[in-house]
C-alpha cells in the first residue's frame, strides 16, 4: 500500500488514543487495528487475511507494540466482543436488527433495485446506506438475502406496473409468442404446475408455437437483398405486437437491457413457468429492444447496400475495360519525340514523320488516345449506367420496402430536401415504368442531384423540356441519405444507434452542470481551460526548443521528406538469465495443452463458482456447469468453435454447450473475473496496480453469414475485428466486436471509459489509428492520456500558441504551422463538455456520438474538438520527441500487431521507468506543463 494511503486511513488520531490507553501488547495492537478498519470500512475485519502486513506494521509503530504481537490476538471470545462494543459506541454505530433488515429490503427495492439489477451494485448501495445510517453491516449471508429480497420485490413491482399498461389484446399477443393462451395458463397456475429450468437444452418441439418469437430473436444475415427483406419481416412481426409508445419510458436502460438479455436466453418452456406478469414483462422488454435493434440493422443494411451498389458497379466496369485498357508509359518522352519530329519536318505527312518517331508507331498513339477516353468522362458515365441498372433490376425492391417501414427526420434544415425527396420517392414507388416524374410535380433538389450526376438526373424530353429521371433521382437520393445517416444529420424514428442525436446527450446537463464539470475535472470558465492548454503548449515547446541541440536522436530542419527526423530506438538488451528460465520451464513442464491450463486455473481458484445464470436460477450440478463453461470458453477463446469442441471425447453435446454459453457467459462474468484477479494478485510478483492499458484490434476470419462480416484490405480476408484493452499484467479489461471498415478511435475511447472493472484508466497506449486529432481532443476532455504510435512523424506539424510567437521557438520553426483557434474552443466549450459527459455517463454509445463528428459534417463542436486535439497532440509530440524514455515506454506499452506472433509479454505495457513517471504524470490533466 502506498505511504499516502497508510497515512490517510491508518494514522491514529489524538481522540482515538484515549480509547487505546490502558491496553497492552497484542490487545492494544488488535484494538487499534479494529478501530481503524471499522473507521474506514464501516465493519470489522473477518480475519487476519483481510489485513495487509504493511498496515499492521504501520499501526504497530504508532502504538509502540511489535507487529509480531498481532499473531497472539484472539479473534473470538469476550475480549474481542468488548473491543467491538467500544468501537461501535465510540463511532456511534449499532448492530443490524431484524426490523432493520426488513426496512433495508424495502428501501433497496424502492430506491436502488428498481434501477439496478446487478446484485453487486445493489450490495454496494446497501453498504453505503448502512454507513450513512450508522448501522453495522450484518453477516455476508444475511446481506445476500436482503439484496435478493430487494431485487425480487422490485421485479415483482415492475412486472405488475408494466402489465397494467398493456391492453388485453396486446397481452394475448405476447402470450402467443411462447405458445400459451389464457385458458392453458389458468389451468397451469391453478394446478401449481411450475417447472424449474433443468439446465439442459430445450427439446426441438418446444418451439412449435414460437416461430414468430424465433424470427424476432434471430440475428441479421449478411449484406444482401434477402437479408434486408428478412429484417423488414422481423420489424413487421415485432410491430404486430403493438406495444404502446412510452411503455418503458421510466425504466433505466440497464434494467431494460437485463430483462431483454434474460428473455433472449430463456426457451418458451421456461418462459411459460413464470408468473403471468413476469412473462409479460420479459417478453415485452425483448420485443421493445429488438424493434430498436432491428431498425438499427436495417439502417446499417441501407448504408452498406448503397455503398455496395456503387462499389460493384465500379468493379464490373473496371473488369470489362481492363482487357481493352493498355496503360501507355513514358508519355513525356512520347510528347517530346512527337514535338521534335513535327518541328524538324513540319511540311511532311504525319504518317511519315510522327509515327516512326514513337516506339510502337501508330498503335502506341492509339493506345494513348484510348487510355484518355477510358479514364475520362466516358468511364464515369459507364459506371453510372451500370449502377442504375443494378439498382433498378435488383436492389430497388428492398430499399423501397425499407422506406415504407421507417420514418426519417432531420434537425438540420439543410437536409430537409433529402427528407422531402424520400417522401416523393415513396409516393411514386409503384408508378410502374414511368421514366420521368409528372410535370407540375415539385421535385426537391438536394446535394446528391448536383455534380457528376446532374446530367443523368435532369434530361430533356422530346419537346426539349427539362425533366427529372425517376430512377436516377432515386439513386442519388439514397446516396445522399447514406452520407447523412453516417453523420446523423438524418436520423430514424424508433432506432437506437441512429436515433435523434439530441437524445444522445444527457437531459439533465443544465441542471447538473456543476457536477458534470467536476466529474470531468474541468473548469466552468472556458478561459481557465484555454489558459491551462496554452501554458502546457508553451512549456513543452520551450522545453523542446531548448533541449534540441543536445538531442542526438532528433533533428528539425527544412527538408522535402519532412521537417522532423527522429532516429529509431534500438532493441533493448535481453534480460539476464531469460534464456535459462525459458529452457528450465520447457525442461520441467514441456508443452502443456491450453485446456489443461484452463482446467487447473478453474480448480485452483474456483473462479467459475461465481458465474450465475442470466435468468437468475440454475439446477445444473456445479461440476457439470464448470465443464461446459470451460468447453465454451476454450471454443471461443481459441476460435476453435463450439461445434469442434463438442466433438471431443466427453458427455456434453453441442446444444448443451451453447445453452450454457447463452445463459451464463455474459460480459459481466468477464468483468467479475478481471476484478477478482486484480484483488487476488500478489503485489510482490505483479507489482502495484497499473493505470494504463494497451489497445488494438485482432482480425478474426468469419463466414459471410452476418451483417458484420466484411473484407479487410490489410489482412486480406473476410471477417470481423475484435478490439481489446489489456492492462499491464496481460488481463483483458474490455473487448468489443467491430466491422472491418469501422473506425477504431471510438472503440479505443469506449473501452477506456466504460470497461466496467475496478481499474482506473489514466493512460491508453494505442497503435497509429489513435493519433487522430479528434481522438486527442476527446481524450483530453475525458481526462485520460492518449499515448499513440505517431505514424510518419517526419510530416507531423506543431501548432503555435498565438500568431505573434513565431520567434519564441526558432529551432522548431521548420516543423511549426498555424496557431490554434482559441476563439472556436471558447465558443463551443460548453457543448464539448456536454458531449464528453454523454460519453462518460453512457447515455449513448461512443460510436453513436462520434458518428456526428465526421469530416463530411462541418459541426461546430467537432471543429472545436479538433482544435483541442491539435493543441493536445502538439503537447504530446513535443514531449515525445524530447524524452527518449517516453519513446521507449511508448514502444513497449503498445500492443503487438495481431497475427505476427508476439507474446503477451511483448504486447503488454512494460513497467514504467522511474525517469518517465514524471513525464507521463505531467501529461495528465491539471499538471501538464508544470515542470
Image (tube, rainbow, N blue to C red):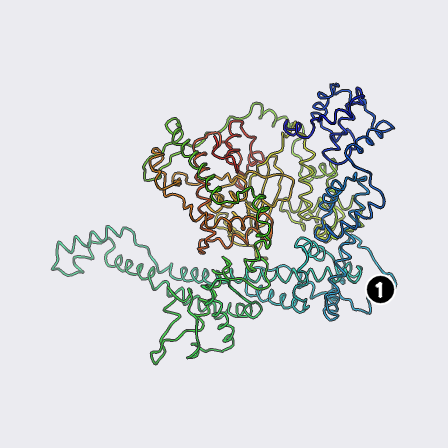
480, above or below 84, in the image: below
Residue 389 can be seen, yes or no:
yes
48, above or below 900, in the image: above
Where is residue 56 drawn, in percent x and y?
Answer: 72, 25
Where is residue 313 drawn, in percent x and y?
Answer: 44, 63
Where is residue 248 drawn, in percent x and y?
Answer: 68, 60
Locate the N terminus and report the quarter of the image it occupies: top right
Element under label 1?
A: helix
Mark 1: give few (<14), some (14-19) or many (20+) Cα within 10 Å. some
* Drawn side of residue 30 relative to residue 552, left or right: right
Q: How many numbered callouts?
A: 1
Q: Residue furthest bottom?
A: 463
* Drawn side of residue 154 relative to residue 372, left or right: right
Where is residue 742 drawn, in percent x and y?
Answer: 52, 52
**Residue drawn at (73%, 60%), measured in percent from left and top?**
281
Please state which of residues 360 and 679 is positioned toward the viewer in this rendering. 679
Q: Residue furthest left?
A: 347
Residue 700 can be seen, yes or no:
no
Please state which of residues 297 and 897 is positioned toward the viewer in this rendering. 297
**Residue drawn at (71%, 20%), measured in percent from left and top?**
61
Provide the residue designation for mark 1: 188
> Where is residue 39, by image quadrant?
top right
Please state which of residues 377 and 257 is positioned toward the viewer in this rendering. 257
> Where is residue 599, by image quadrant?
top right
* Drawn side of residue 404 relative to residue 647, left or right: left
123, above or below 508, in the image: above
* Drawn side of residue 130 relative to residue 257, left or right: right
Amino acid at each position: 500500500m502506498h505511504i499516502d494511503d497508510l497515512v490517510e486511513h491508518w494514522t491514529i488520531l489524538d481522540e482515538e488514543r484515549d480509547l487505546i490507553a490502558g491496553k497492552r501488547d497484542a490487545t492494544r495492537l488488535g484494538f487499534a487495528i479494529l478501530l481503524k478498519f471499522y473507521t474506514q470500512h464501516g465493519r470489522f475485519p473477518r480475519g487476519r487475511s483481510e489485513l495487509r502486513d504493511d498496515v499492521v506494521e504501520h499501526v504497530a509503530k504508532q502504538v509502540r507494540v511489535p507487529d509480531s504481537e498481532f499473531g497472539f490476538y484472539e479473534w473470538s471470545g469476550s475480549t474481542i466482543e468488548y473491543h467491538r462494543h467500544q468501537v461501535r459506541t465510540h463511532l456511534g454505530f449499532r448492530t443490524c436488527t431484524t426490523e432493520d433488515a426488513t426496512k433495508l429490503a424495502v428501501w433497496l427495492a424502492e430506491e436502488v433495485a428498481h434501477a439496478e439489477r446487478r446484485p453487486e451494485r445493489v450490495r454496494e448501495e446497501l453498504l453505503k446506506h448502512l454507513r450513512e445510517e450508522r448501522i453495522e453491516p450484518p453477516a455476508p449471508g444475511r446481506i445476500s438475502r436482503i439484496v435478493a429480497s430487494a431485487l425480487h420485490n422490485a421485479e415483482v413491482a415492475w412486472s405488475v406496473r408494466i402489465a397494467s399498461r398493456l391492453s388485453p389484446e396486446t397481452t394475448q399477443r405476447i402470450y402467443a409468442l411462447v405458445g400459451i393462451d389464457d385458458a392453458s395458463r389458468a389451468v397451469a397456475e391453478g394446478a401449481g404446475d411450475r417447472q424449474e429450468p433443468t439446465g439442459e437444452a430445450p427439446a426441438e418441439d418446444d418451439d412449435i408455437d414460437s416461430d414468430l418469437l424465433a424470427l424476432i430473436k434471430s440475428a441479421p444475415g449478411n449484406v444482401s437483398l434477402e437479408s434486408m427483406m428478412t429484417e423488414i419481416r422481423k420489424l413487421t412481426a415485432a410491430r404486430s405486437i403493438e406495444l404502446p409508445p412510452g411503455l418503458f419510458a421510466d425504466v433505466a436502460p440497464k434494467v431494460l437491457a437485463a430483462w431483454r438479455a434474460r428473455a433472449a436466453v430463456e426457451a418458451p418452456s421456461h418462459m411459460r413457468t413464470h408468473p403471468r406478469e413476469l412473462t409479460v414483462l420479459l417478453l415485452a422488454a425483448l420485443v421493445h429492444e429488438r424493434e430498436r435493434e432491428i431498425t438499427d440493422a436495417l439502417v446499417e443494411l441501407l448504408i452498406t447496400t448503397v455503398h455496395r451498389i456503387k462499389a460493384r458497379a465500379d468493379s464490373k466496369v473496371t473488369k470489362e475495360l481492363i482487357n481493352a485498357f493498355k496503360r501507355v508509359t513514358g508519355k513525356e518522352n512520347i510528347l517530346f519525340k512527337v514535338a521534335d519530329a513535327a518541328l524538324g519536318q513540319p511540311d511532311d505527312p504525319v504518317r511519315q514523320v510522327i509515327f516512326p518517331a514513337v516506339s510502337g508507331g501508330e498503335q502506341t498513339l492509339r493506345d494513348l488516345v484510348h487510355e484518355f477516353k477510358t479514364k475520362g468522362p466516358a468511364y464515369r458515365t459507364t459506371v453510372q449506367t451500370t449502377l442504375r441498372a443494378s439498382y433498378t433490376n435488383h436492389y430497388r425492391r428492398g430499399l423501397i420496402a425499407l422506406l415504407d417501414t421507417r420514418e426519417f427526420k432531420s434537425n438540420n434544415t439543410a437536409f430537409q430536401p433529402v427528407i422531402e425527396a424520400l417522401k416523393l420517392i415513396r409516393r411514386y414507388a409503384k408508378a410502374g415504368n414511368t421514366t420521368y416524374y409528372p410535370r407540375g410535380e415539385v421535385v426537391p433538389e438536394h446535394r446528391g442531384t448536383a455534380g457528376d450526376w446532374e446530367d443523368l438526373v435532369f434530361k430533356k424530353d422530346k419537346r426539349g423540356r427539362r425533366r427529372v429521371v425517376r430512377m436516377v433521382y432515386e439513386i442519388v437520393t439514397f446516396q445522399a441519405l447514406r452520407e447523412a445517416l453516417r453523420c446523423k444529420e438524418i436520423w430514424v424514428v424508433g432506432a437506437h444507434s441512429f436515433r435523434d442525436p439530441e437524445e444522445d446527450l444527457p437531459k439533465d446537463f443544465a441542471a447538473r452542470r456543476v457536477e458534470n464539470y467536476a466529474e470531468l475535472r474541468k473548469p466552468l470558465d472556458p478561459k481557465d481551460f484555454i489558459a491551462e492548454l496554452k501554458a502546457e503548449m508553451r512549456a513543452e515547446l520551450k522545453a523542446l526548443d531548448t533541449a534540441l541541440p543536445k538531442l542526438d536522436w532528433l533533428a528539425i530542419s527544412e527538408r522535402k521528406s519532412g521537417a522532423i527526423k527522429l532516429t529509431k530506438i534500438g532493441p533493448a538488451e535481453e534480460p539476464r538469465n531469460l534464456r535459462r528460465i525459458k529452457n528450465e520451464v520447457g525442461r520441467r513442464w514441456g508443452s502443456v495443452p491450453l485446456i489443461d491450463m484452463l482446467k487447473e486455473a478453474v480448480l485452483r481458484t474456483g473462479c467459475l463458482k461465481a458465474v450465475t445464470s442470466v435468468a437468475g436460477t440454475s439446477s445444473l450440478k456445479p461440476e457439470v456447469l464448470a465443464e461446459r463453461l470451460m468447453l465454451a470458453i476454450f471454443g471461443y477463446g481459441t476460435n476453435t468453435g463450439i461445434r469442434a469442441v463438442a466433438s471431443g471425447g466427453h458427455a456434453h453435446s453441442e446444444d448443451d454447450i451453447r445453452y450454457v454459453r447463452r445463459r451464463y457467459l455474459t460480459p459481466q462474468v468477464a468483468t467479475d473475473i478481471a476484478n477478482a484477479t486484480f484483488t487476488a494478485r500478489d503485489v510482490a510478483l505483479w507489482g502495484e496496480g497499473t493505470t494504463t492499458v494497451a489497445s488494438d484490434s485482432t482480425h478474426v476470419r468469419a463466414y459471410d453469414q452476418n451483417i458484420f462480416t466484411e473484407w479487410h484490405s490489410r489482412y486480406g480476408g473476410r471477417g470481423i475485428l475484435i478490439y481489446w484493452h489489456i492492462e499491464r499484467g496481460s488481463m483483458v479489461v474490455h473487448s468489443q466486436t467491430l466491422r472491418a471498415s469501422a473506425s477504431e478511435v471510438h472503440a479505443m475511447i469506449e473501452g477506456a471509459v466504460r470497461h466496467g472493472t475496478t481499474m482506473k484508466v489514466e493512460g491508453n497506449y494505442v497503435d497509429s489509428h489513435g493519433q487522430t486529432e479528434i481522438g486527442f481532443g476527446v481524450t483530453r476532455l475525458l481526462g485520460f492520456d492518449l499515448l499513440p504510435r505517431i505514424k510518419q512523424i517526419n510530416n507531423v506539424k506543431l501548432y503555435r500558441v498565438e500568431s505573434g510567437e513565431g520567434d519564441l521557438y526558432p529551432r522548431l520553426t521548420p516543423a511549426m504551422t498555424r496557431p490554434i483557434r482559441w476563439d472556436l474552443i471558447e465558443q463551443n466549450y460548453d457543448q464539448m463538455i456536454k458531449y464528453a459527459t454523454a460519453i462518460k455517463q453512457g447515455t449513448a454509445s461512443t460510436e453513436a456520438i462520434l458518428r456526428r463528428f465526421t469530416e463530411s459534417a462541418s459541426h461546430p463542436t467537432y471543429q472545436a474538438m479538433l482544435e483541442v486535439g491539435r493543441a493536445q497532440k502538439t503537447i504530446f509530440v513535443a514531449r515525445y520527441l524530447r524524452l527518449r524514455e517516453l519513446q521507449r515506454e511508448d514502444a513497449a506499452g503498445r500492443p503487438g500487431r495481431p497475427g505476427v506472433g508476439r507474446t503477451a509479454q511483448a504486447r503488454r505495457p512494460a513497467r514504467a521507468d522511474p525517469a518517465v513517471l514524471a513525464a507521463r504524470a505531467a501529461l495528465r490533466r491539471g499538471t501538464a506543463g508544470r515542470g
